[in-house]
Amino acid sequence: MPSERLVFVTGNAGKLNEVREILAQGEAIDIESRDLDLPEIQGTTQEIALEKCRRAAEVIGGPVITEDTALCFEAMNGLPGPYIKFFLRELGHEGLNHMLDGFPTRAAWALCTFAYSAGPGTEPVLFEGRTDGRIVPARGPPKFGWDPVFEAEDTGLTKMRFSHRGRALQKLRAYLQAQGEGGRGA
Amino acid sequence: MPSERLVFVTGNAGKLNEVREILAQGEAIDIESRDLDLPEIQGTTQEIALEKCRRAAEVIGGPVITEDTALCFEAMNGLPGPYIKFFLRELGHEGLNHMLDGFPTRAAWALCTFAYSAGPGTEPVLFEGRTDGRIVPARGPPKFGWDPVFEAEDTGLTKMRFSHRGRALQKLRAYLQAQGEGGRGA
């Protein structure tokens, strides 16, 4: 385990609790949160996550976790992807559906990327979790960003917001445990 | 006129010539070009242009001009906007048309933003030029990025790539001339 306290960059108490629960399973990993407004670059989901985590480590001055979520349309080769927040804000749920009216498929995937850096100057490591599904007219309560228009394929439900995040977090957990066993906690 | 040599950030010789021609009208403004790979942030066209010009001024260490072009769909409240390059790359001309199949309007505008900074630490000034038009099936030679699918409204032509750039450049020229008359060239 890291000797310095690990910081998860989020302003969301629910997300902090979720990360704490999953990462701490079986081990006492001490995690606190900081709400930072970090500029995000344009690029692939990987480039964006790496740069954000690098900047976060510099600002925090210690080990840090950042998180990004993208919603990728198959018909658009993965776009809007990391830019989904802008499209959701400008077009709403109905508009996101209309974007696909001219294409033969409404298949989509939700991609969650956790990034971990051991500290400033240390290249971040990425952990991705993906849920496949499709874009559907909005269902359920009008909240959770684009959740109401994304139907996960294995369930037919639009409430799968945590499955891709959970998958990414399990990978991060395995990594941190392996680091701990390798003696990083000394 | 600036006493230091003004640098226009571009790797495109044609763009350099165009900028030289328009900015130098009636005055001897000395401009050179540098091809820099600057990271671009996510945000509004203004935020993106300001940050890129700030970074360019830091890297160059003197007065600098940067340029950004966006293609904005009215049905999407201005998106894809600054992200058009990713959508063009992944969807091609046909896909850009299909994105609008589900919406009632194909109206669009091309937006060119020049940014000028007098040097590191000096807040950049923005100069915007806009051409209104609409998205159409591709015409003409398959080049110039999204030019073949953008029809300028006053002409019915899809070759108007320079009109919004020209408008922005004229504003920049007037600004630089006013600065020169104010004695900055001393």
Image (spheres, coloured by chain):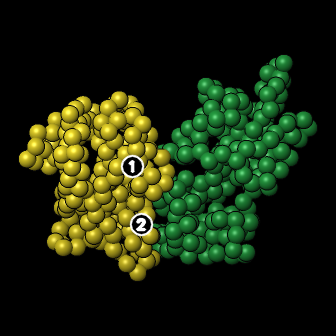
Chain colours: A green, B yellow
Q: Is residue B3 left or right of residue A7?
A: left
Above or below for A99 versus A117: below
Q: Name which quarter of the figure residue B157 lies in.
A: bottom left
Give the residue drawn at x 21%, y 49%. B178
Specify the label residue B78 is tagged with: 2
Specify the label residue B49 is tagged with: 1
Residue nearest the viewer, comparing B3 with B30: B3
Give the residue drawn at x 34%, y 64%. B94
Give the residue drawn at x 76%, y 44%. A33
Q: Residue furthest left?
A: B26
> Circle 2 sits in a helix, a strand or a loop, which is it?
loop
Give the residue drawn at x 38%, y 52%. B85
- The mark lying in front, picked from 1 and 2, is 1
- Neighbor class of circle 1 (other Cα within 10 Å; few <14, some 14-19, many 20+) is many
Q: Is residue B94 left or right of residue A121?
A: left
Q: Is residue B157 left or right of residue B87?
A: left
Please give the count of numbered marks on the rendered protein: 2
Residue nearest the viewer, comparing B37 with B8: B8
C-alpha gap between disc 1 and disc 2: 16 Å
Amino acid marked by disc 1? Ala
x then y, percent, for residue A171: 74, 39
x then y, percent, for residue A84: 55, 59
Residue B37 seen in the figure: no
Which is nearer the N-term, disc 1 or disc 2?
1
Q: Residue furthest bottom?
A: B104
Above or below for A43 versus A118: below
x then y, percent, for residue B12: 23, 40
x then y, percent, for residue B29: 15, 39
